[in-house]
Image (spheres, rainbow, N blue to C red):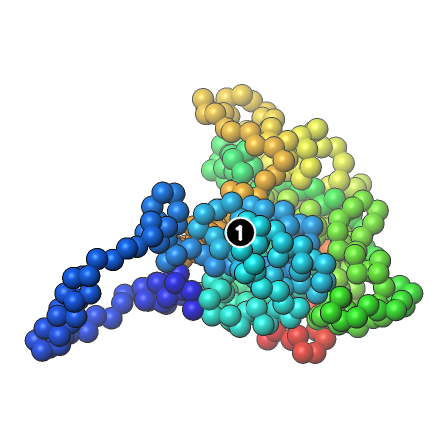
Amino acid sequence: MSKLSKKIQAAGGAVGGRAHVGRLSRRQFVKTAAAASAVFAVPQVIPSSALGKDGAVAPSERIVMGGIGIGRRGSYDLSCFLPNADVQFVAICDVKEERRQAVKKIADERYGNDDCAMYRDFRELLDRDDIDAVLIATGPNWHATAATYAARAGKDMYCEKPCTKNITQSLQLAETMRRTGRVFQVGTQRRNLPHFAFACELARTGRLGTLRRVYAHPAGMTQKMSGWLPAEDAPPIEVVDWDMYLGPAAWRPFNNVMLNGFHFEKGGGFMGCFEEDGSFSGGGVLEWGSHCVDLCQWAAGADGTAPVEYNPPQDGEIVARYANGVELILREKDWLPLGSCPVRFEGDDGWVETGDSGKFVLSSPELLAGRTVEEIGGYPATFHVRDFLDCVKTRNKPKGDADTACFAHIACHAANIALLLDRQVNYDLAKHEFIDDAEANRLRGEALRAPWRIM
């Protein structure tokens, strides 16, 4: 068990509490005092790094971390973790040998040693008592399953998005984090960027008047099946563990294109694939939607709920409605040139639109009310990572906690179902099922391949 884990446990467990203090008899007290005197009679030389001096962080304050599935996006996330002095990255798990070696090289060079351990099976990494938290940056197929295993192993986690593939997984993930008391941060890093936070604040606090519409950019409103690509000779398991790569998804033969298909690029990859037999993603709305819809939920004060009505695309827009009448509109076109992942919020008294450029446009300059909002372009994850690390220590909820992620993902999944079925669907938030719609309800979840069932 790491020093930080012991410290949290001594404070009362995963969420907090009061340490038990026993009473000492007079004889026990005398013995303890004598032993302490003997220790302090001898001069002790303690390295300044152990005391947290000279800019170092004491071992008891360090968060010991491992990584699961560190590819292109994960490597960026890792670059945001490693500069933090209170992080000690000690292990990498990946199904690809070249990635294991690459991440080990990065970690070992960072610390000037050869200590970063490598694993092919993430369960071996999670078995380590000295690891406090994990970075999960696998493909979407693995996110919820790996996060559930991590929570059950007592690890906190920063998990890339989309963090679930369907409605059932969204509910299971949130329930698992509540039950285990783990700190969970989904990689919706825009929640920790000032211009997005300011835009959401304007909408949420009534500065725009009565809120009417929130707009999200899904970056894709199509549905397709990944299918079975032609079978190819699989490399040795030590080089690529294809069975572990598939994980809970339906089995299919090895194909190198599919092996490298978990990336987002217009017109390619598998991020838009939606399939009932064990999808590799969660449909076309989910990739950008898990960012933009998340921001719309925040702006609408809807973090603990989701729209109840979802309509198929019409005139290039998917329109969903919350129970209070506010519309969530997903559209790909007609955005101001403010960068990727744009959002727009409209009320009776004004509107605001912003995006990844760090800039925003207001219906009236009076909405600024004399404030200066820092413009940070390029959607860096450094602030989101720091939020997570601080919450690991304080046991507070981070900005992208599991409950927040659950409902934003449900909204995306339900929109995908309306898109796939090409008709309106209505969602019952109390029962978490579609109303009088057996066909839509079959799409709420999927069978997971053994042994990866998580409930």
Q: State the image quarter where residue 108 is shown.
A: bottom right
Q: Residue furthest left?
A: 26
Q: Nearer the viewer, residue 90 or 305?
A: 90
* Marker count (numbered): 1
Q: Is 304 above or below relative to 358?
A: below
Q: Nearer the viewer, residue 86 or 388?
A: 86
Q: Residue at x 70, y 28 (%)?
A: 337
Q: Position of residue 380 (x, y in %)?
A: 59, 40
Q: Position of residue 205 (x, y in %)?
A: 47, 38
Residue position for label 1: 112
Q: Position of residue 258 (x, y in %)?
A: 82, 60
Q: Quadrant of the N terminus?
A: bottom left
Residue 430 is left or right of residue 217, and the answer is: left
Q: Quadrant of the C terminus?
A: bottom right
Q: Is 199 above or below relative to 430?
A: above
Label 1 element class: loop
Q: Is residue 264 visible?
A: yes
Q: Is residue 425 visible?
A: no
Q: Nearer the viewer, residue 313 or 253?
A: 253
Callout 1 amino acid: Gly
Q: Residue at x 51, y 45 (%)?
A: 83
Q: Residue at x 19, y 61 (%)?
A: 42
Q: Is 441 above or below relative to 205?
A: below
Q: State the image quarter where residue 358 is shown.
A: top right
Residue 253 is left or right of residue 36, and the answer is: right
